[in-house]
Amino acid sequence: MIFQPAEEDGRGGQRMVQEGIMDRFGISQVFGMHNEPGMEVGKFGICDGPLGAALDEFDIIVKGQGRPCGLPT
């Protein structure tokens, strides 16, 4: 069982591979799981077929003109 640091930003797994975890422990496959606090202890759930997620970053630029709060426009 591997606990991946920095999983959400996508850098943890890459660093683990770069540092040789796959070769060091003879790992040929990795399956990712997330915990589900509401699920009964001792059980786990799976989905049929492919399932994926992504972490994306983007910037939003808001242009406009402000006015003091509480004053009419």
Image: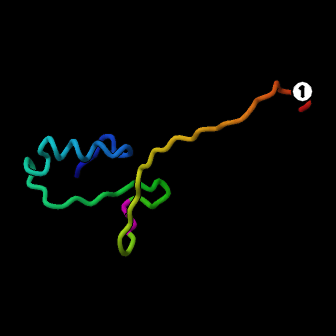
Is 31 or 11 nearer to us in this picture? 11
> Residue 13 appears at what percent x and percent y?
25, 47
Q: Where, by quadrant of the figure, is residue 26 drawn? A: bottom left
Task: Name which residue lies at 38% across and 55% down.
Answer: 34
What is the span of residues highlighted in magenta in the rendered image? 42-46
Task: Name which residue lies at 10% across and 50% down.
Answer: 25
Is 41 or 56 nearer to us in this picture? 56
The answer to whether residue 35 is magenta is no
The answer to whether residue 44 is magenta is yes
Name the residue furthest top. 68
> Residue 10 appears at what percent x and percent y?
33, 46
> Residue 52 appears at what percent x and percent y?
38, 62
Residue 50 placement, left or right of 61? left
Query: Which image quarter holds the C terminus?
Result: top right
Is the magenta region chiefly helix, strand or loop?
loop
Residue 31 sits above or below residue 24 on the image: below
> Residue 30 appears at what percent x and percent y?
22, 58
